[in-house]
Image: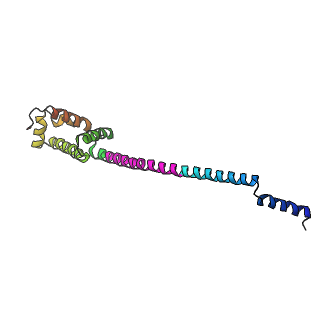
Amino acid sequence: MANTSAIRAGRAFVELFADDTKLVRGLRAAERKLRAFGDGIRTLGLKMMAIGAGLLTPLIGSAKAFSAMGDQVAKMSKRTGLSVETLSELRYVASQTGTEFESLEMGVRKMQRTIYDAGRGTGTAVDALADLGLSYKDLARLSPEDQFKLLAERIGKISDSTK
């Protein structure tokens, strides 16, 4: 059984905190301030999270777009034999002139087909290269990039636009 001094100590505890003394009022005020501070920190954290999500969403979209572009360039590089670097440069030029990247690939493939046909002796391909002062042998020893550059250079020198 509990002795009377323990009961009195418990009663004093109850009386102390049941009483609306300055201490209790001060503790309650401190509790309210701490709760308000915690709510403020929580609100700030939620706002920062929203801002972070708002900033992250476009970055993720950009990363996906760049990844898709890189994949497209890599696949075209395999199909055409042009390096990824060259295709990236050509892609930029195409975008500046309003040309679709796929049109660029079709042009490169047509160039390669013309060179191939000239190697087989097809008259129109041989004639087209001859109009530029070139032959199949001139182009066969070059890389696809160098073929493209040489043909572009020669086409740029044509003064008669009907040719």
Residue 143 appears in view: no
* Residue 58 sits inside the magenta stretch: yes
Return the x and y of residue 84 as percentages of the image width and height.
Answer: 32, 41
Percent coordinates x, y for residue 163 in the rendering: 9, 37
What's the magenta region? Answer: 46-74
Percent across and percent down for residue 31 are 68, 53
Above or below, comparing residue 153 to residue 7 in the picture = above
Residue appearing at x 77%, y 59% in the figure: 19
Using the image as rendered, state which of residue 155 and residue 18 is in the foreground: 18
Q: Tell me which secondary structure the magenta stretch mostly adopts.
A: helix
Answer above or below: position of 157 versus 19: above
Q: Is residue 58 left or right of residue 31?
A: left
Tell me the quarter of the image containing the N terminus.
Answer: bottom right
Question: Which residue is rendered at x = 19% and y = 45% of the image?
Answer: 110
Taking 63 as reference, is 132 left or right?
Answer: left
Give left or right: position of 129 versus 26: left
Front residue (pair 2, 139): 2
Report if residue 62 lies within the magenta region: yes
Please state if 106 lies on the left or on the right of 4 as rendered.
left
| Residue 106 rendering spot, x and y as whole percentages | 21, 46
